[in-house]
Amino acid sequence: MNQALMIFYHKMLKVFASTIGIGKNEQEASERPTAPPKKILSVSKKLLIAFEEGTILRQKSFYAEELGKGQTAIVGRLVNACECFDIAHEIGHAIYGIKNKQVPEQALAVQSVVGFLADIQDLSQADKEALIEPWTEEICADLIGLNLTLSQPCVPPYNSWPNYKQYLCGGAEISHLLQMMIGEFIDRRHFGSRIALVSTHPHDYLRWKAISRSPDKAAITDNIGFGKMFGNFTMWILNSLFQKDERGEYQLR
């Protein structure tokens, strides 16, 4: 696993936790910052720059003492869940190959990929068709990985988590949202508005949306919705850190 990415997960999830207010119990968690927005943005900016420059190990995030007990618990569970999903995704690739691409996740994956590519106007049809197969495999590995993750029995450490599947599902969504945050930050910082939506792997926004539409996620009851909350957090961070100049190009504040 990418150690720098795992460190980034841990440190940025501390920042995210500072935007969550905890009521009488975790089921009452809501988007209610307990830290000043200016500090949240400042720490987020430093973490994103540090990750890009390879200094994430030395960059400070929020201290545990700055978070409440409930917020600290959420950080630990979501970090664990992100790492669990990342491993399950790789196992998903193996299952996809062993079953010769004949998996139930295929239909949703193809639908997601084709729909996303259809909205990219400046890409030739030949290029779009060339991306369908590799992107479909990545989405299938995500969906298989999510299924594997949520199929785990309620054993330690999960048996100490209330409704542990909502954390595991949230970790799967947040894993891609964190990577989308990194990619989008770097693209906006160096390429302005000329952000590349295509590569050998699908854009993380597409991967997040496919997971959020998964029947495995829909089956979770009493879901707090950590993925949606982190999605809002991601876009708030990106839109607050950048502004567009008179040419319509992104500039880091």
Image (cartoon, rainbow, N blue to C red):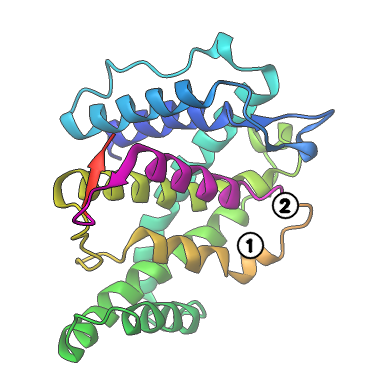
Quadrant of the frame with the N terminus? top left
Judge from the rendering whether residue 54 lies leftward or rightward of residue 4; answer left or right.
left
Location of residue 161 in the rendering, given as x and y in whole percent from the top left corner: 71, 35
Q: Which mark is residue 131?
A: none
- Residue 234 on the magenta segment: yes
Residue type pointed to by label 2: Asn
Residue at coordinates 71% horizontally, 47% vertically from top-left?
A: 224
Location of residue 170 in the rendering, given as x and y in whole percent from the top left corner: 58, 48
Q: Main secondary structure of the magenta part?
A: helix
**Residue on which disc 1 sits:** 217
Tell me if residue 191 can be seen.
Answer: yes
Rendered position, 203 above or below 126? above
Residue at coordinates 31% horizontally, 25% vertically from top-left?
A: 46
**Residue on which disc 2 sits:** 223
Contact, CB < 8 Å: mark 1 with mark 2? yes
Residue extent of the magenta highlight: 224-248
- Residue 233 on the magenta segment: yes
Q: Nearer the viewer, residue 164 or 229?
A: 229
Quarter occupied by residue 201: bottom left
Judge from the rendering whether residue 25 lies leftward or rightward of residue 245; answer left or right.
right
Q: Earlier in the sequence, mark 1 or mark 2?
A: 1
Q: SS for tag 2?
A: loop
Location of residue 14 in the rendering, given as x and y in whole percent from the top left corner: 50, 26
Location of residue 156 in the rendering, given as x and y in whole percent from the top left corner: 65, 33
Residue type pointed to by label 1: Lys
Within 10 Å of disc 2 (Cα), the crowding (few <14, some 14-19, many 20+) is: some
Within 10 Å of disc 1 (Cα), the crowding (few <14, some 14-19, many 20+) is: many
Residue at coordinates 49% horizontally, 77% vertically from top-left?
A: 105
Q: SS for tag 1?
A: helix
Tell me if residue 97 can be seen.
Answer: no
Residue at coordinates 20% horizontally, 63% vertically from top-left?
A: 196
Quadrant of the frame with the C terminus? top left
